[in-house]
Image (spheres, rainbow, N blue to C red):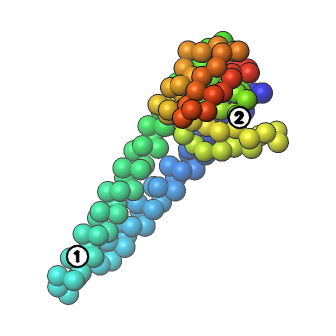
Amino acid sequence: MDKSKILEVVKTRIIEKIQKFENLIESTRASNNDTKSSMGDKYETGREMLQQEINNLQRQLNETLGQQTVLQKINVEPCTKVQNGALVQTDKGLFYIAVAAGELILDNQKVITISPESPLAKSMTALSKGQSFSLNNVPQIIKEIW
């Protein structure tokens, strides 16, 4: 399995997410400016709700920018132990430890991207091929690490 290909797909997905948040923030700000009027308190409430939405989108954008920073530090060299940047095949699935970007289908194979802070990644961190671990009383065996 080619980790560099997975990393590029994840990076592209994060860039698209950043652009989406930037566009949403821009359009929400534009609609916030459109509601500026002297029509009274009803519009002030609407403007406050729009500002809260902008703040929420900005927080999500900042989290996604943080994910982008993490991805820039990922090494695609082969791994012998489970760590950040490792691609891990267990008897339950194929996991790429980098950022939580969801499920990918590459070469007709499902890869689940997870954060190193996720319970699953923490359960198998520093383990090697052939070792087992358990998460939520579900035992798993590490079949391969790339």
Q: Regarding mark 1 in the picture, which secondary structure is present there?
A: helix
Provide the residue designation for mark 2.
93
Residue at the right extreme of this rendering: 108
Percent from the top left, x then y, of residue 65? 45, 41
**43 or 126, which is in the foreground?**
126
Of the numbered discs in the image, which one, if any, rests on residue 111?
none
- What is the crowding at mark 1: few (fewer than 14 residues within 10 Å), some, or many (at least 20)? few
Placement of 46 over or under 139, stated as above or below: below
Question: What amino acid type should be assigned to the residue bearing mark 2?
Answer: Gly
At horizontal 60% and vertical 22% (from top left) the residue drawn is: 133
Q: Quadrant of residue 15?
A: top right
At horizontal 40% and vertical 60% (from top left) the residue drawn is: 25
At horizontal 54% and vertical 40% (from top left) the residue drawn is: 100
The numbered mark, 1 or 2, whose residue comes first in the sequence reads 1
In this picture, residue 136 sits left or right of residue 38 = right
Placement of 96 over or under 81, stated as above or below: below
Question: What amino acid type should be assigned to the residue bearing mark 1?
Answer: Thr
> Which quarter of the rendered picture does the N terminus lie within?
top right
Q: Quadrant of residue 3?
A: top right
Percent from the top left, x then y, of residue 90? 70, 27
In this picture, residue 116 sits left or right of residue 75 = left
Q: Regarding mark 2 in the picture, which secondary structure is present there?
A: strand
Of the numbered discs in the image, which one, if any, rests on residue 45?
1
- What is the crowding at mark 2: few (fewer than 14 residues within 10 Å), some, or many (at least 20)? some
Placement of 43 over or under 119, stated as above or below: below
Does residue 10 appear in the picture of this structure? Answer: yes
At horizontal 65% and vertical 44% (from top left) the residue drawn is: 103
Say which of marks 1 and 2 sits in front.
2
Q: Quadrant of residue 82?
A: top right
